[in-house]
Image (tube, rainbow, N blue to C red):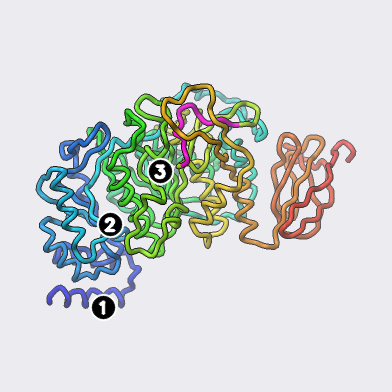
Amino acid sequence: MLAKLVSVILSFVMSVTGFFSTAVSDVIDSVSELLFGVPYTVEAVKYDFFNEIDDSDVVELDDDSGFINDKIAVFVDSDMSFSQKLDFFAGCGGVLAGWCAPADLYVISYPGMTYEQVMKKCDELDMKDGVELSVPVMAYKTEKNITPADPFDSTADEPVVWDETVPGGTNWWLEAIDARQAWDYSDNFSKINIGVLDAGYETDHPELTGKITFPDSKQARRNIPDSHGTHVAGIIAANHNDVGIAGVCDNSNLICIDWMPDLLQFWSTDISIFFGVSTLVKAGAKVINMSLGTSGSKTSNSTGFIERVIGTAATSYMMASLLSKGYDFVVVQSAGNGDIFGDPVDARHNGHFCSLTESNIFTGSKNVSKQDILNRIIVVASASHNGDGTYTQSEFTNVGSAVTIAAPGEDIYSSSLNGGYEVFSGTSMSAPIVTGVASLVWSVNPSFTGAQVKDIVCTSTDSVAKIYTESEYYYDVELMEYPMVNAKLAVEEAIRRSDASCGTVSGKIIGSADRIVYAGKSHTVYSDGTYSFVTTEGSGTAELFDRYGNSVGSFDLTVMAGQTTVAEDYNITSY
């Protein structure tokens, strides 16, 4: 009776003060936790129990997976009332340790148990009204998907040369995705929140100043600066400040979480990923980057029962819970860099979102389809450039049908610790490039769905990452070509889908021209003289400029809505 009375009072307080007041919700949840040990609002998150988990709590099941012997993760129905939650947790036989209400996820502590006892307890909990899924808290040897750093000359002062037709140099990864051409449409970009789940970040790095925030003060205190997280963050969003590097999506705010366990721990839990992703989504992140996975600890090409059944069910249900509540997002995960020996395996063995397929997704009672979930996952393989404008999959990258797209992943120059820069290789570097492109697309039209963003990113391409044929694959893996991500084409497709009055124009300039200006907008000309851009239908004069800003010619253009117009070649020498 008391619980029902308090529930009515809390509900009235929230209706008067405003449900979406974070401060009010926090106070209400604190009062509810103090009185009943259970949060009241659907936005509550508590993860203090993470600090209590260490490697001594892990019981190994095989070489690379285990479980926490005193914790069970329970996903409940979104419609479960506050009083029903009170009754359930009072009779669960354990103590409620933490929660991530946006994902309907609650973690219960019990005395230490064997795996058989844990599974029996999960079966008992699954029989309770309102419970959708109960699973052990699994632990994996999850790691950053990076290969060792290559040496580089940090004192080099050679001017940066841009040549998108034949990418090379420290900016080759931006050349390969036509980043400059995408940035030509900066007037179309709105501010976007990007989530990063990685090792820690150097928040005062010149490339990241003013860019990084954390979901809350606790997460900020958990942050331990790390070269990997700083490198990934720079690839996504480094400031365009005329020094160092330029990130793919400059007009952005990075919401970051340091997911790495304590420096003395080797194992990490799956719920750290669940809580991390859910917290980032709740904080407003639209695209979430995960440059991490489990394949690097594997000694074979076999996916264990744990990953196939328990991990995929919990991961997919978490996504279903968030989507059912109106959150929309895209998760970008690295495909992984092979097994413990560096030999490529099927990308599904990289765990987490890489492992989800239509056959193993669990959505419970949520009104969310399996395809809704798959439409919001992008798995990224690594590619290298061949020096002639073509690309090949990296020797180390995981492959298979789980991979969605490829992106540059070798010799990627980005920000690092102590305000410096470093060259890293790995699918860890490929994923944030795709994250940046997806963020650009979503920033063009914030009303896009996550499914639309994925579709645009993964279909707006004009080159492929060819199969690596110079080495034997030790496992039975599915080999195929993958589309190479292209920022320019993806942004242009986003613009076309957002404005039916737009058309495309392309052509070639014979002679030296750096930019073409039409309808008040400037567009980059490729080194071979070709150009193409999207603009509003109509007729007007196009002006050409060289790299020094001098006018070198002009000609008339006509653009038709929904069509591609190929202009006649223009010869500057006859101008």
Residue type beneath disc 1: Phe
Residue 439 visible in the shown view: yes
Q: Are marks 3 and 2 in contact (CB under 8 Å)?
A: no
Q: Is residue 48 above or below residue 243?
A: below
Q: Which mark is residue 184?
A: none
Question: According to the image, label 2 marks what residue?
Answer: 100
Give the mark nearer the N terminus: 3 vs 2: 2
The answer to if 398 sits in the magenta stretch is yes
Q: CA distance from mark 3 to mark 2?
A: 22 Å
Question: According to the image, label 1 marks what residue?
Answer: 12
Quarter of the image with the N terminus in it: bottom left
Kindly identify the residue that appears in the image at 21 percent across and 54 percent down: 107
User: Which residue sits furthest right?
Assistant: 574
- Give the x, y percent position of residue 506: 75, 47
How many residues crowd mark 1 within 10 Å: few (<14), some (14–19), many (20+)? few
Q: Is residue 196 above or below residue 74?
A: above
The answer to if 288 sits in the magenta stretch is no
Residue type beneath disc 2: Cys
Give the mark nearer the N terminus: 3 vs 1: 1
The residue nearer to you, when weighing 209 against 6, is 6
Element class at badge 1? helix
Which of label 3 and label 2 is nearer to you?
3
Kindly identify the residue that appears in the image at 15 percent across and 73 percent down: 3
Q: Which residues are magenta?
A: 391-401
Residue type beneath disc 3: Cys
Which of label 1 and label 2 is nearer to you?
2
- Give the x, y percent position of residue 377: 45, 49
Q: Which mark is residue 354?
A: 3
How many residues crowd mark 2 within 10 Å: few (<14), some (14–19), many (20+)? many
Kindly identify the residue that appears in the image at 43 percent across and 49 percent down: 331
The image quadrant of residue 370 is bottom left
- Give the x, y percent position of residue 237: 49, 44
